[in-house]
Image (cartoon, helix red, strand yellow):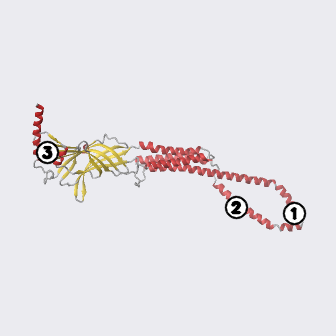
Amino acid sequence: SVLDESISRNDSQLQPTIQKLMKGYNRYLRPNFNQGPVEIGMSLDIASIDAISEINMDYTTTIFLRQRWRDSRLIFPGNESLSLDGRLVSLLWIPDTFIPDSKRSFLHDVTVENRLIRIFSNGTVLYALRITATIACIMDLTKYPMDRQECTLQLESWGYNLQDVVFYWTRGNDSVKGLDTLRLAQYSVESYYTTVSEAAYETGFYPKLVLHFSLRRNVLFFILETYVPSTLLVVLSWVSFWISQSSVPARTCIGVTTVLTMTTLMMGARTSLPNANCFIKAIDVYLGICFTFIFGALLEYACAHFCTMQHQTIVDVQRESNGMTHLANSTSPKKMQTEESTQQETPEQSVTCEGNEATDKKKEKGCGLSSVKQMSRRAASMMSVENPNNIDRHARVFFPMVFLLVNIFYWFYYLLF
């Protein structure tokens, strides 16, 4: 048929063209050999950023890497381009580009290796790859989860130095696409830019392209998961200030329960973070503040209960002393009568009374012991609180005010600095 004849004619025209281009072609020699460096333009399409790990400090991304260079050995007549099978890449010279910070990477091969080779009539070669790589990103988690991370994607030449190969971005910052529309689970891409530099090694200076991009963590998830529960636990610990001090089981139960719950919350917040990280993170500071207030509320009840018991003891002692004074006043008339009768006693009776001086000395020693007890009671009364219920009244105002001021300072510092 006419269609089959046209296909066979096009095949006969194309096949000699490829054979002619490959005739005498040495893929082990770079273009412009002994004539200057080869200029290689790069562009990237970020298909996805699959995972960002704070534990391993890396991110996994899938990219489309496109490289362009001019090889005068591949010039052919006409204005058309030749799209070749990706398996023919073994017949051509290609740059030895690599990602220096990559931990793991692979080239997709479903259903065939995801390569693209296109040769233009002026000798320009377009080489495209689809790569998934896990790339290191050093993170500063001091302000976690209100942190902002700066990550990079670097491209370098493995064996060709600056005298052989020169890298450049084909359209500057517009050479990178896909980051504007990227949607991540915990992060949002704030900005990105490209730079051209060189990598210095012992073997020489090599071309280097760098993509810088800034990631800001979405803090709303952590507010709902960690900050709100911890704040509510602090507020729950304040409920004990409105419970009577005589209700020991109720207040103790609230204090111990909130302390244990806060401890569990602190342990759960650290499971997703690297254990070897020596930095004190913002979330650790807030959880520490909440734990301090909760533990302080438990200690407040201990102090209030102790003051109440001490105050009750002093009241009981005062009652006893008042009762003894009243009894002594009631017996004073009898004592006066006894003194009058004593004055009318005979000398023999006075001698007998002189014989009882040793007994009076023993009584004086007893009075000395009672004075020591009175001094200790006075010291205890000086250290005691007149009304222990005022401790709870002051705590109802003091704890919320201090917690509010600490929160204002905390959020002001970590959000603005």
Label 1 vs label 3: CA separation? 143 Å
Can you name the residue that lies furthest to the top here? 1
Q: Residue at x 45, y 50 (%)?
A: 284
Q: Secondary structure at mark 2?
A: helix
Q: Secondary structure at mark 1?
A: helix
The residue that label 1 is drawn on is 343
Choose the circle earlier in sequence order: 2 or 1. Answer: 1
Which is closer to the viewer, label 3 or label 2?
3
Q: Which mark is residue 123?
A: 3
Label 2 vs label 1: CA separation? 34 Å
Choose the circle earlier in sequence order: 1 or 3. Answer: 3
- Is 265 situated left or right of 313 in this image? left
Query: What's the amino acid at mark 1?
Result: Gln
Q: Secondary structure at mark 3?
A: loop
Crowd band around label 3 with a 10 angstrom C-alpha radius: few (<14), some (14–19), many (20+): some
- For this rendering, which residue is in front, 141 or 108? 108
Which is closer to the viewer, label 2 or label 1?
2
Q: Are marks 2 and 1 in contact (CB under 8 Å)?
A: no
Query: What's the amino acid at mark 2?
Result: Val
- Image quadrant holding the N terminus, namely top left
Can you name the residue that lies furthest to the front here? 1
Q: Report x, y in % for residue 223.
A: 44, 43
Q: Report x, y in % for residue 208.
A: 24, 52
Q: Residue at x 12, y 35 (%)?
A: 7
The residue that label 2 is drawn on is 372
